[in-house]
Image (spheres, helix red, strand yellow):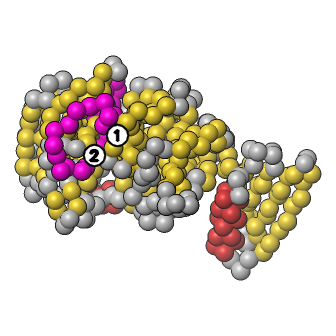
């Protein structure tokens, strides 16, 4: 059953399928009205239910399902303005901040937004971004770090103020126009204009310089922090990984292997590194001490590749996503914990583990303009 509510006026819509029949119950001004429509098959009825649900979301309704079972959405909100390459979001203090691509105004200017949601999906604020295209957003303590078209900004949810870090920091002359943001525990790392910085305890410190290699006219650059924030994995060349000490920039390890071009990497709880090959979506697990390939039991079959993946803050849960199929793996046991389908995906999505009111969910922002929380 889909339970939708318009938080602005209290109107409700309940949808359910019984066999080949779609049953719709609308509640407005305390009055209930029920309609039924029969379809040629149960599949057609279910498809019609999903369509009506989507139309309602676009009209401002929010899907709320407090009784959701594992693999079901407890919350869905239509954000709109999806752009395939920029689906950034981040949670902070029980709230969720989701990027929305706005549109061109008269005069050719482009306004993009950060949508501020509470735990029940209510839009508390629509914040105009200082620059368009939010490639990444990460929580760093009580603030957010945003990669806005390769410029790193700090956003304070309490004051609503943005700070352009490129104006605070001095940069050497560089033609490098790549960037990243990553965070773990009390440490964040970010890069722009060929330099990497750390943010720890409110203090920003320069770490190292970098230069990204080009492959098929696309720069190679991705990074990840270990769970305690003391190690940074950096990939800016094909078949090469560096592990850096975030306290002093020392290269702890450097290894090369024939793993291709990574476009995403993350540390797992055992200290190993998981990477996704850009062109094949193949997953590669590496020992960060030796650089040797590892073959954990879970890295088999359908779990051997992914379009998107994310790891929980403690590194013990891994979510792998292939198109609209999500699989959550318990890395302690190596077992598949749950698999389920994601809603409203056209080509891709971005996913993160987010903790809301003490419970962990899989949060997903799709390129069809939807933001969801799935019970896991």
Secondary structure beneath dot 1 equals strand
For mark 1, what is the residue? 152
**Depicted 360 relative to depicted 202: above or below:** below
Q: Is residue 349 visible?
A: yes
Q: Nearer the viewer, residue 6 or 255?
A: 6
Q: Which residue is mark 2?
A: 179
Stretch of the chain drawn in magenta: 165-189
**Quarter of the rendering occupied by the N terminus:** bottom right
Residue 370 in the image: x percent, y percent? 56, 55
Q: Residue at x 19, y 49 (%)?
A: 176
Q: Residue at coordinates 29% horizontally, 44% vertically from top-left?
A: 180
Q: Closer to the camera, 42 or 345? A: 345
366 is higher (above) or lower (below) than 189:
below
**What whole-number distance in Å separates the C-alpha atoms at marks 1 and 2?**
8 Å
| Total marks in image | 2
Residue 341 magenta-highlighted: no
Q: Determine contact: label 1, label 2, CB under 8 Å.
A: yes
Can residue 363 be seen here? The reply is no
């Amino acid at each position: 059953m889909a339970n939708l509510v318009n938080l602005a006026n209290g109107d409700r819509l309940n949808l359910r399928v019984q066999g080949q029949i779609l049953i719709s119950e609308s509640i407005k001004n305390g009055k209930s009205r029920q309609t039924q429509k029969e379809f040629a098959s149960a599949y057609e009825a279910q498809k019609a239910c999903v369509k009506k649900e989507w139309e309602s979301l676009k009209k401002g309704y929010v899907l709320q399902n407090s009784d959701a079972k594992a693999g079901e959405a407890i919350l869905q909100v239509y954000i709109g303005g999806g752009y395939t390459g920029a689906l950034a979001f981040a949670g902070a203090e029980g709230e969720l901040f989701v990027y929305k691509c706005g549109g061109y105004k008269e005069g050719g200017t482009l306004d993009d937004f950060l949508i501020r949601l509470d735990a029940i999906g209510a839009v508390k604020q629509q914040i105009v971004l200082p620059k368009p295209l939010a490639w990444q957003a990460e929580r760093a303590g009580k603030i957010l770090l945003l990669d806005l078209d390769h410029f790193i900004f700090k956003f304070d949810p309490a004051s609503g103020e943005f700070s352009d870090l490129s104006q605070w920091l001095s940069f050497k002359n560089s033609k490098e126009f790549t960037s990243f943001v990553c965070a773990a525990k009390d440490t964040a790392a970010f890069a722009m204009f060929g330099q990497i910085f750390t943010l720890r305890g409110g203090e920003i410190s320069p770490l190292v310089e970098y230069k990204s290699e080009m492959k098929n006219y696309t720069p190679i650059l991705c990074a990840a922090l270990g769970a305690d924030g003391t190690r940074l994995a950096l990939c800016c060349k094909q078949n090469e990984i560096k592990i850096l000490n975030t306290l002093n920039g020392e290269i702890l390890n450097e290894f090369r292997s024939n793993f291709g071009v990574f476009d995403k990497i993350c540390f797992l709880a055992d200290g190993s590194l998981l990477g996704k090959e850009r062109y094949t979506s193949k997953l590669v697990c590496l020992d960060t001490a030796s650089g040797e390939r590892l073959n954990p039991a879970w890295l088999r079959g359908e779990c051997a590749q992914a379009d998107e993946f994310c790891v929980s803050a403690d590194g013990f849960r891994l979510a792998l996503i292939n198109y609209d199929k999500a699989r959550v793996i318990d890395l302690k046991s190596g077992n598949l914990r749950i698999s389920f389908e994601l809603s409203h995906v056209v080509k891709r999505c971005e996913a993160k583990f987010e903790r809301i009111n003490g419970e962990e969910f899989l949060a997903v922002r799709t390129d069809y303009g939807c933001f969801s929380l799935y019970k896991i």
